[in-house]
Image: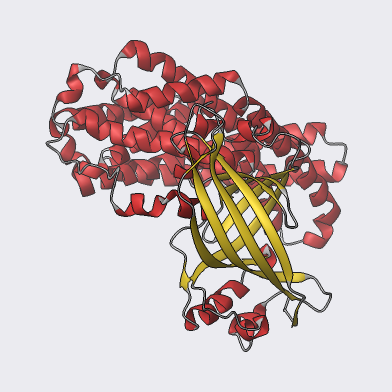
Amino acid sequence: MSMLRVHREVEKKYVADDGFELPPLMELVAGADALSAAAVTPVAEGDRVEQQLVATYFDTADLRLAAAGLTLRRRTGGDDAGWHLKVPAGADARSEVRLPLGRGARTVPAALRQMVWAHSLGAELRPVAEILTDRTVRRLVDVTGHAVAEVADDRVTARRLLPTDGPGDAAGAPTSWREIEVELDDATSDLLAAVDIRLRERGLQVAPTASKLAHVLDLQSKVRDGSGKAKKLKVSSPGGEVVLAHIREQVQQIVAQDLPVRLDAPDSIHKMRVATRRLRSALTTFKPLFAADVVRPLRDELKWLAGELGAARDAEVMRDRVRAAVEEQGDAAELGAVAEIAHAELDQAYASAHDRVIAELDGQRYHDLLMTLDRLVTSPPVTGKAAAAAGRVLPRQVARSYEGVRRIIEDADSKPAGPEREELLHDARKSAKRSRYAGESVSRVFGEDAIVFAKAMEDVQEALGEHQDSVLTRERLADLAAHTSSTGAAFLYGRLHALEEIRSAKSQQHFDAAWKAAGRTSVHRWLH
């Protein structure tokens, strides 16, 4: 794993015919307003470089990686020969995981197989396409000679390798095309808009697909023909179908966040954890619709995964919360060295927690859970109650989730301040979140009524969350103060602890208002 390197690229591709002449690159950025704010400004065009690239792309027989927007290839030639796994990372951006070529041309390295396991589910990764590219590279360089942008003029010949029981090299009909690819360093992404305008002014069109593989596999036509389009659901639709549509979305999100979590992408752990909780909540709220012997152990496994993600998420939240609190102090010069110690300790705590998450994602228990989730959406274990109309069966279950919140809060209100009440408020927060998720999960058929209900429960959840976050932050600050070797850091943690006590008091006021609003008749009318 230590040989893995991750590179972030920002690029755009354009379709070009054989007669197109690429202008001098400085013309593409001349007079561009975007350059005035650029951290690095191109000043000249470097020498042209001719390259011959040969790439073999790997996927499952049913192209699961391509369906997820991933490309996995082994490429020779050029400046970065090796194994490459490309992962979407926002508009016009991808993260590229790189490994050396190694000896095996037909065997995907174990580290990359592990990284895509959530998508492949352990299925064989075989060659699915071969692409030969004659590339002319031209670069824009800054005053130091460093390349800040690269424009590649590619003449491409590709063939699809048809799935076979043999070595996987039966070739489909070859296809050829020309494309222009503009790639920028992440730090100079503000140049992309300027270059894009100039190229389109010269008649180029943005390529309909983000990768050469998608072109040769003709994935865009599969999107255009509407295959796999979601069914329109209504109040009269079977309740099981409505809940399963929500469940499928959460399973897709868990799988989609697997690679971002591994690459430590911002907010990825939070997104994966939320999807896990939403899924578990749906299986709990609507449990009469599903076979208990299948769903009960699945809920336990989802609780386990959420817990593993939670440790890293809590460390991440704590780090960011303390960092923000330090910045609010306003005396950065005085706190400078002390704040650095605090930040280093919290960064290390998060890094350790993230490492533990990755170890679990590489483990058999997580793999087994993914297989179970796949069976859940492909062969749903529904009961006879799932066939009842959504309008008859689902509001009743959402109403029960709200009653659960009300009972816990009434119990908490009857207790004096102390650990028992704190625990009940924590339970109320979890119950409010489950009720919110219940409303959101059926909003596709109950519309505004469900949305208003879910928003009211979200306000309750967030108010209770402010309180619980403050409790946890104070506990963590006390622990940090007890174990730090810096007296200055210990003093800082004490100051932040006092601020959290003030926040906790304010959160009670927020909760009182949110809970009163959530109890309005208009919020619940649709449930009866």
**Residue 53 located left or right of residue 199:** right
Residue 19 lies, in percent from the top left, at 51, 78
Residue 320 lies, in percent from the top left, at 65, 48
| Of the pair 384 and 168, the residue shown nearer to us | 168
Residue 77 lies, in percent from the top left, at 72, 54
Residue drawn 51% across and 31% down? 120
Q: How is the image coloured?
A: secondary structure
Image quarter in which the C terminus is found: top left
Residue drawn 48% across and 83% down? 201
| Of the pair 168 and 255, the residue shown nearer to us | 168
When the figure is inspected, residue 470 is found, relative to residue 284, above or below; the finding is below
When the figure is inspected, residue 161 is found, relative to residue 209, above or below; the finding is above
When the figure is inspected, residue 448 is found, relative to residue 481, above or below; the finding is below
**Residue 441 located left or right of residue 427:** left
Farthest-out residue, top: 293
Residue drawn 59% across and 79% down? 22
Image quarter in which the N terminus is found: top right
When the figure is inspected, residue 466 is found, relative to residue 148, above or below; the finding is above
**Residue 502 located left or right of residue 446:** right
Residue drawn 63% across and 47% down? 321
Asked if residue 345 shows in the view, the reply is yes
| Of the pair 235 and 230, the residue shown nearer to us | 230
**Residue 65 located left or right of residue 132:** left
